[in-house]
Image (spheres, helix red, strand yellow):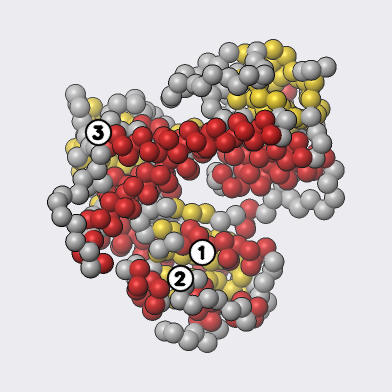
Amino acid sequence: MSNAYDVIIIGSGPGGYVAAIRSAQLGLRTAIVEREHLGGICLNWGCIPTKALLRSAEVMDFATHAKNYGLKIDGSISADVKAVVDRSRGVSQRLNGGVGFLMKKNKIDVIWGEAKLAGKGKITVGKTSKKPMEPQPPAPKGTKGEGEYTAKHIIVATGARPRALPGIEPDGKLIWTYFEAMVPQEMPKKLVVMGSGAIGIEFASFYNSMGVDVTVVELMPQVMPVEDAEISGIARKQLEKHGLKIITDAKVTKVDKKANSVVAHVETKDGKTQSIEADRLISAVGVQGNIENLGLEALGVKTDRGCVVIDGYGRTNIEGIYAIGDVAGPPMLAHKAEHEGVICVEKIAGVPGVHAMNKSMIPGCTYCHPQVASVGLTEAKAKEAGHDIRVGRFQFVANGKAIALGEDQGLIKTIFDKKTGQLLGAHMVGAEVTELIQGFVVAMNLETTEEELMHTVFPHPTLSEMMKESVLDAYGRVLNA
């Protein structure tokens, strides 16, 4: 019976390992299958290491503009590319080890290999076909490997991978995905970034701060297309002021490869074309779920547009099979995966009062410079949904803490239902907004009205004061603008 479990989770990214921990906490015998690195893309090649790179870029930017803070740095400022990358990889390795510790602490069996659904309540684990980007550490003593395993409940948490456009497929040398962009051996002088979602714009911001000539090409009319149009416009202005070149309503139609450079042919909506020569091109046109070779089709598990179809509790159309995280569709965010995993296993365990996932309350964060963060409906979406709305705005330039930080460009925008006072959405651009947004996320989850927000005392001097001022502005009561 050693290979029989209550719950087996395929994939150890944020959704998978958090689901495993919650499952074990609830007394279920739990195992997790991983083919490469504990922590998945997020810890090893996504959320965490990119933030380490962006921190280096931020420090570089501050050092370059030290005189703005009354400081003098003698000598030139330059980046040690290897040291920057090594620091980022070190951060990932530290957290990777932390996940291993959590598995051991919670008595969760780790099965190394590649899993496939072999029937109702059964999986087989074979050798990993995917070559790891980095050497796989030795399997911890006591972990399991190839073989057959059974479980009453099987959760698919296999994540996603970069999407490739036909004819512009990444080759790892001249055309990069986020994998190669994260570990450059040397800084390119010129770079084209195809796509301005969170991944594309974060890498564009990083390389730009490191002194690279960066051009971003975006198919949609605005950068960061999912964001509120007003916020996107402000972000674009600041990014361009920082030196980024941005072309919207445009697409890369063809890429010519040379010995150590590329030529990207760009066509705009009005039919005009231009050629941009660069050392490298980053393809950041989205991701797609890892649904292949899992045995989903044989069991009749429903998929749609490259993702597994689930309900609000992670259940598929086949009893005993579940899916969470990126493989289960957008928004493809680590924190969504984690919460989805908790909901899924709590429903499996029969925990009373489990709430289905509410995607309207999932915050989104982009860690470029300036940062962008949001939750809920944009102004346009609120109007499309038929809401009669009130909109509040507060500029960073009117906030004392922002001025003291030397970060006085930004906006906090709030959207309320005029009839009920319900907070429908909050959108921010500026310093530290990825930390501020959670205040509005909590407010929305508590079904807070504008009155309660206006009666909340915010500390001074802080950036968070602007959140209250934005609410006050929506109701004609703003104090400091």
Which class describes the residues within 10 Å of circle 3: few (<14), some (14-19), or many (20+)? few
Name the residue beneath numbered marker 2.
463
Kind of residue indicated by mark 3: Glu
User: What is the C-alpha distance between the residues marked 2 and 1?
Assistant: 8 Å
In this view of the protein, can residue 32 be seen by the observer? yes
- The residue at 15%/55% (across/down) is 74
Instruction: State which tag comes first along the sequence, 2 or 3.
Output: 3
- Using the image as rendered, state which of residue 407 and residue 218 is in the foreground: 407
Q: Secondary structure at mark 3?
A: loop
Q: Secondary structure at mark 1?
A: helix
Kind of residue indicated by mark 2: Leu
Residue 436, label in figure: 1
Q: Quadrant of the N terminus?
A: top right
Which class describes the residues within 10 Å of circle 2: few (<14), some (14-19), or many (20+)? many
Q: Quadrant of the C terminus?
A: bottom left
- The residue at 38%/53% (across/down) is 368
The answer to whether residue 2 is above or below residue 370 is above
User: What is the C-alpha distance between the residues marked 3 and 1?
Assistant: 35 Å
User: What is the C-alpha distance between the residues marked 2 and 3?
Assistant: 37 Å
Q: Position of residue 108 (x, y in %)?
A: 71, 29
- Using the image as rendered, state which of residue 425 and residue 431 is in the foreground: 431
Residue 156 relative to residue 392: left or right: right
- The residue at 85%/50% (across/down) is 352
Asked which quadrant contains residue 334, the reply is: top right
In this view of the protein, can residue 377 be seen by the observer? no
Instruction: State which tag comes first along the sequence, 2 or 1.
Output: 1
Name the residue beneath numbered marker 3.
186
Asked which quadrant contains residue 68, the reply is: bottom left
Kind of residue indicated by mark 1: Leu
Residue 281 relative to residue 46: left or right: left
Q: Secondary structure at mark 2?
A: loop
Q: Position of residue 374 (x, y in %)?
A: 51, 60
